[in-house]
Amino acid sequence: MFRKPTGSPADRGAAPPRQRREAGPDGMIIERDVPVPARGGVTVYADVFRPADGGPAPALIAWSPYGKHAGPQLPERYPDGGVASGQLSEYTAFESPDPVHWTARGYAVVNADIPGTWYSGGDATFLSPEEAWHGHDLIEWAGTRGWSNGRVGMSGVSYLASSQWTIAGTRPPHLAAINPWEGWSDTYREVARHGGIPETYFWPYIGQRWGYGTGRVEDLAAETAAHPFFDEFWAGKAADLSRITVPAYVVASWSDQGLHTRGTFEGFRKIASEPKWLDAHGGKKWGYYYSEEGLRRQQEFFDHFLKGLPTGVTEWPRVRYEIRDRGHPAAGTRKTGEDWPLPGTSYVPLYLDAGAGTLDRSRPPAAASVSYDSERAGRGRGRAVFDFRFGSPAELAGGMKLRTWMSAPDATDMDVFVAVQKLDGYGDLTGFPFYAVFTDGPVALGWLRASHRELDPALSSPWQPVLAHRRALPLKPGEPVPLEIEILPSGTLFRAGETLRLVIQGRDIYRYPRPLIQALHDDSVNRGPHVIHAGGEFDSHLLVPVAPGSRL
C-alpha cells in the first residue's frame, strides 16, 4: 500500500540534486548529491565526505530516511537528549556519524537518502527486503570507488541501526563491519504492537516523518490496520538475524524500553557474527553515541576491521554491561560477561501475595485476589502494586517474566501494562533515563493484550515468553487465565533496605505531555475491573534474573 508523500523535500530544506564538490573544514572534501545506481533502475543520492588528502579511505555508511542534508541538529530538536549545543558539526545528519570528526581520522562518510525519500528514486518501503537490497548496492558502490580502500562499515542510531540488521543480512561482499547503535529488529513486536497492544503515538508519528519525497511512500498506517497479527507482511520487516556474519559492535541500553531495547539485545543474541561484542549501558542513546567514550570505542572497532590496525578491540570482553544504582545524577558500575543472557544467571521466582501487596520467595498457601479499575490509571483503584524489600544487596541483570493469573468479569479481552520500579531506602521512587529524553523512567516495562497470550514455543524460553501473534484467543468473562508477560532487559543494583516494586494496571504507566515523543497505547479493549489471582493453585510470580556473583 502506498500514499502520497507527507511533504516535498523543498519544504524541509532539501535542494534538488545537483552534483557538486565543496571544500569543508580543514580541507575536508565534500561531494554533494552523488547519484548511486541501484537495482531496479533506482538512483539513490548520497553526500560523500572524504579526508583532505583524498587517499584511499574506508567508508562509513549512514542509510537514513531523515535527510542527508542535516537540517536541525539533535540538540535543537531534542534538547534533553544528552547532546550539547555545538557538540556536533553542521554537517552531521540526524543520528549519523559526524563527518568532521571521522574524516579527520581517515574515514569517508557516506550519507544516503533511502529510496523514495527526499530526491532518491523508487518507492519508499521502510525496512523492507527491497530497501535492504538497495542498501546492499550502495555498500558495493562505496567499496569500489577510487577513493575507497575497499572496506565499508555501517554506523548510526535508531533507524540507521535497524537498517544495519536488514542490509547486513544480504551479505554485501565489501561490508567489513557494522555498529548497530540501538535499533529494533522486529518492527511488529518492538514498535508497532507491544504485547499485541497497538502503539498509537510514536508509530503513527514516525511513519509521517519518514514520508518526505517525490514518489510513492509506503502507507504504514493503512498496512498496520490491515495486518493486526504477525503475518508475512510483518515478517518482511523483521530482520533475518541468522544471516548476519560480519563483525559487529552492538550497543544497547536499558533506557529505550518500548523502542530499541528489546530489538538490540535480540540482534546481538541471534546474529551469527564472530566476532561480536555487546555494550549495554543505562544512559541516553544519542548522548553515548556522540560521547568521548562512545567515539573512542567506535574508532577502536572500525580501525581494526576497516583499516586493519591493531587496537584494543581484540581485548574487549564479549559483553560489557552497566548495573545502574540511580539515574539522576547518574550512577552505575560497568561489569563484563561472556555472553547474553549472562551465563550463570539465576532466575528466581518472587510470588505475588494479593492480600498483602507483596512479592515473596514462597508462594502463599491460600489463594487470594486483588482488582483494579482497568479504565483508570495511576494510584488508588487504577493499579495493583506488589513490593519486595531486599535484605541484602543484589544485582538483577537481564529480562524478567511476569506470570500472572488474571480475569476480567466484564470483558472478553484485556490490556495489561507492567512496570518494574526501584524505591530507595526511604521509600522514594528512583528514576532512570527513559525513551532518550526523560529521566524519571522505570527499571523495565512489559505489556500484553490477553487475546494475544498464545506463546511461540520455538522462540520462547523459561525466562523469556515470546508471543506467537497468530490469532486472537478471547477470554471468558470472569474466568482466570495464565498470562506470561515479557519484561524487557535491565540491569539494576538493589541495596539492602531498597525495594523492587511491581506495578500492574490497564493504561500506560509512564505518560508525558504531548508533543513529547513517547510510546502510548490509547486503542484500549479494557472494560471494568481486572482481577489478579495469586497464591494456592495460582502460581502468579515475577521471575527475576539474579546476576552471576550475586544472591537474592
Image: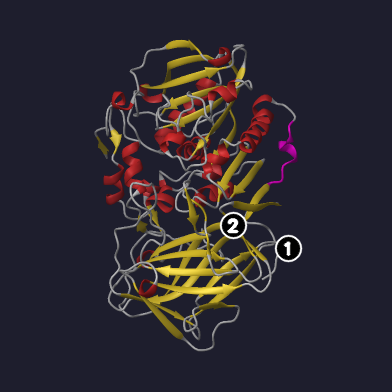
Is label 1 in contact with label 2 (beta carbons under 8 Å)?
no
Where residue 94 sits in the image (x, y, percent)? 45, 32
Residue 436, above or below 146: below
Inspect the image, locate mark 1, and give the three-letter code of the amino acid beneath it: Gly
Q: Which residue is mark 1?
A: 549
Name the quadrant containing residue 69. Answer: top left
Where residue 231 sits in the image (x, y, percent)? 36, 51
Residues drawn in magenta: 311-318
Inspect the image, locate mark 2, and give the three-letter code of the amino acid beneath it: Arg
Residue 339 seen in render: no
Residue 16, above or below 400: above
Where residue 133 sits in the image (x, y, percent)? 45, 31
Q: Which residue is mark 2?
A: 326
Where residue 481 sits in the image (x, y, percent)? 40, 76
* Magenta-span inclusion, residue 314: yes
- As drawn, the residue found furthest toward the front would be 426
Element carrying mark 1: loop
Residue 481, above or below 377: below
* Magenta-span inclusion, residue 268: no
Q: Nearer the viewer, residue 168 or 47?
A: 47
Residue 479 seen in render: yes
Residue in view at x 71 percent, y 46 percent: 317
Quarter of the figure with the N terminus:
top left
Name the quadrant containing residue 412. Answer: bottom left
Q: Nearer the viewer, residue 24 or 552?
A: 24
CA distance separating discs 1 and 2 = 21 Å
Quarter of the figure with the C terminus:
bottom right
